[in-house]
Image (spheres, helix red, strand yellow):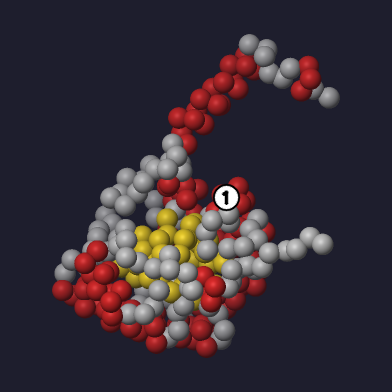
Amino acid sequence: MNKRKKRNSLKKIFSKSKIVCLTAYTAPIAKIADKCADIILVGDSVGPVLYGHKTTRHVDMDMIIRHAKSVVKNTKEAFIVVDMPFGTYETSKHEALENARKIIFSSGAMAVKLEGGEKVADTIEFLTQNKIKVMGHLGMLPQSITGRPKVYGKSEKEKKQIFKDISVLKKVGVFSVVVECTLKKVVDELIKVSDLPIIGIGASECCRGQIIVTEDILGMTELKTKFSKKYFDFFPVAKQAVKKFSLEVINGKYPKKNQCY
Ligand code: KIV
């Protein structure tokens, strides 16, 4: 009998000492990520990465649902989390619940992620009370950036706020929190005081897990941050392949007779 593998449960994921999270928006990347990621995030980074938008604020419900459907359809094991787009959860908790349900029911994903702490705590509580699984997001918040992105946690005010935020997020029932671009010494203190599993990106090697934009580590984007690391250099290889194809077409080498019907 063909045994179907079950998707990772949160219990299984958080029993591990290190958690691997990757983003995916498309079928090919989802299939690759599913082989090793415990959690796959259909992030609103889809806007900048796939569509070339300047910020994540251009992502809407239709776009995120379309990509979430593709990722769910093309994965078997990973736990799928989907970003709630900018403007879909800030106005009212009832609207947030309606949108979270729409994302989850129409894509088949398992959870949503929202940016912010104290400010969105009531909304997150309303979602978790209504059986929506929620992942938090603290530190540098891409949906709130208006100027240049900057590392979070340098001022006393930001430091105080993030400690408050993580304890509020724990109370309202998030299962985990992404902490992005935040001073390592602040993150390390957070890890000491909070038992909420922290998934870092530009945060600290001591986090319970790490998340990264898959296209960034494959060299498919131009991102140059302190935390970025290219495990593959997509562009030179792809350019060479495409050039070879075009030359073979021009020189009559492709297709060969045996490649025709
Ligand atoms: O949208 C995204 O890809 C994210 C991760 C970078 C955490 O939120």
Q: Residues within 10 Å of mark 1 (few under 14, many from 20)?
A: some
Q: Where does the image place residue 72, in percent across and percent down from the top left?
A: 63, 61
* Residue at (54, 73) in percent of width and height: 12
| Horizontal arrangement in the rendering, residue 206 relative to residue 28 (left or right) | left
* Circle 1: element type: helix
Above/below status of 2 relative to 13: above
In the picture as drawn, the residue positioned furthest to the top comes out as: 251
* Residue at (43, 46) in percent of width and height: 217
In the picture as drawn, the residue positioned furthest to the left comes out as: 156
Q: Where does the image place residue 162, in percent across and percent down from the top left?
A: 27, 75
Above/below status of 97 relative to 148: below
| Horizontal arrangement in the rendering, residue 27 relative to residue 256 (left or right) | left
> Which is nearer the eye, 46 or 95?
46
- Give the labeled residue for mark 1: 32
Q: Quadrant of the N terminus?
A: bottom right
Q: Could you tell me if residue 95 is visible in this image?
A: no
> Which is nearer the eye, 192 or 261?
192
Q: Where does the image place residue 190, in percent across and percent down from the top left?
A: 28, 75
Displayed quadrant of residue 57: bottom left
Q: Could you tell me if residue 28 is visible in this image?
A: yes
Q: Quadrant of the C terminus?
A: top right
| Horizontal arrangement in the rendering, residue 187 relative to residue 4 (left or right) | left
| Horizontal arrangement in the rendering, residue 198 relative to residue 24 (left or right) | left
* Residue at (45, 39) in percent of width and height: 232
